[in-house]
Amino acid sequence: MIRKYELMYIVDSSMSEDGVKSIIEKINAVIGKKGELVEQQNLGEKKLAYTIKKKQKGIYIFNVVKGEQETVNEAERTLKITDGVLRYLTIRADTAQ
């Protein structure tokens, strides 16, 4: 069943601009294989509420994705093994129409 998901992930702010772009492109490619990237926002560098992996700041990336659970599982697996990703969170927004 195709559903709408919101995926937010935090990238290490000490990475180069090209490094951040490569992570974003990698995740977009994974989503694009079996799903659809509806919206993407780079919310920029923000101070973290608490230290994560000895980092005080991170770059927040927000995505709205349409796809099946399998698409989200693959994106989360990729985020988990990608260096430079501090945290990620996926929530189901609602059933896509």
Image (spheres, rainbow, N blue to C red):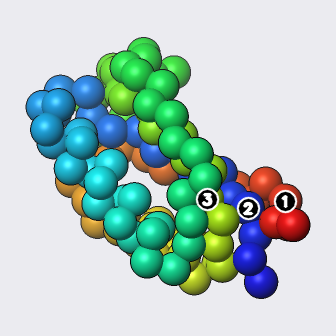
Q: Looking at the rendering, in which quadrant would you find the N terminus?
A: bottom right
Q: Left or right of 6: which side holds 71?
A: left
Q: Badge 2 is on which residue?
A: 4
Residue beneath the point at 64% across and 73% down: 67
Whether residue 25 can be seen here = yes
Mark closest to the chain's N terminus, 3 or 2: 2
- Give the quarter of the image for residue 70: bottom right
Assess whether mark 3 and mark 1 are in contact (beta carbons under 8 angstroms). Answer: no
- Residue that carries the numbered disc 1 in the rendered image: 94
Mark 2 surroundings: few (<14), some (14-19) or many (≥20) residues within 10 A: many
The residue located at (52%, 42%) in the rendering is 40
- Amino acid residing under circle 2: Lys
Q: Callout 1: few (<14), some (14-19), or many (20+) C-alpha neighbours within 10 Å?
A: few
Name which residue type carries label 3.
Val
Q: How crowded is mark 3: few (under 14 residues within 10 Å), some or many (20 or more)?
A: many
- Quarter where residue 52 is shown: top left
* Residue at which label 3 appears: 65
